[in-house]
Amino acid sequence: MARRSVRHDPGVRELDITDVVDAGQHGVRMAFRFGPLVQVSLDDAVAELSWSEAAAPGATRLELPTGLEWRAYWGSVDPILGWYSAGFGRKTSAVTLIGVGRCHRDAPLITQLEFADVDVNPPILHSLRADSEIGRWH
């Protein structure tokens, strides 16, 4: 079983996401999906995000869990990753970040979002169309 906690500190403009897998050592796959307005540059376990075409342009730094191997997919058909759908029968390429590896109960997976030049508020976060998931696999 996996647990997620989220902590937001507006004073330092950070959002911390902590994922813990409860039992033993497991293979995990973690995904972060972004909307088509978000540009993503991935370097190891750090993703620089920007959205200049959005109603409120901005940028942020996403520090991903270092215990996983990270890859970026954009409009991929094998595997089918890196797509965004605004409605039935419509798709646009968009970035999906996938991290794969092993985790331990005593070593949580920590993701940190550091906001650079945008006010952090729910309408902005929602407009980016970002979501994430974590799952166990064997």
Image (spheres, grey):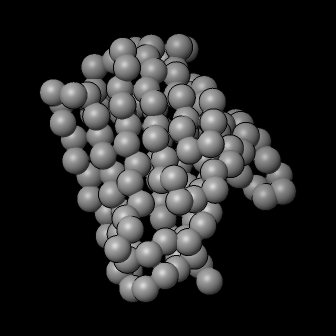
Judge whether 48 appears above or below 70 on screen. Answer: above
Residue closest to the eye, 104 or 32: 104
Left or right, residue 71 beside residue 113: right
Which quarter of the figure has residue 36?
A: top right
Residue closest to the eye, 33 or 92: 33
* Residue 90 visible, this orientation: no
Which residue is found at the position 39% from the left and 85% from the top? Answer: 23
Q: Position of residue 107 (x, y in %)?
A: 38, 68
The quadrant of the image that shows the C terminus is bottom right
Left or right, residue 14 beside residue 74: left
Which quarter of the figure has residue 118?
A: top left
Which residue is found at the position 64% from the left and 56% from the top? Answer: 69
Left or right, residue 119 beside residue 82: left
The quadrant of the image that shows the N terminus is bottom left
Q: Position of residue 115 (x, y in %)?
A: 35, 26
* Residue 9 visible, this orientation: yes
Judge whether 64 appears above or below 119 on screen. Answer: below
Q: Position of residue 83 (x, y in %)?
A: 68, 44
Which residue is found at the position 53% from the left and 59% from the top? Answer: 67
Report the residue that reaches farthest toward the right: 78
Report the residue that reaches farthest toward the left: 11
Left or right, residue 68 beside residue 118: right
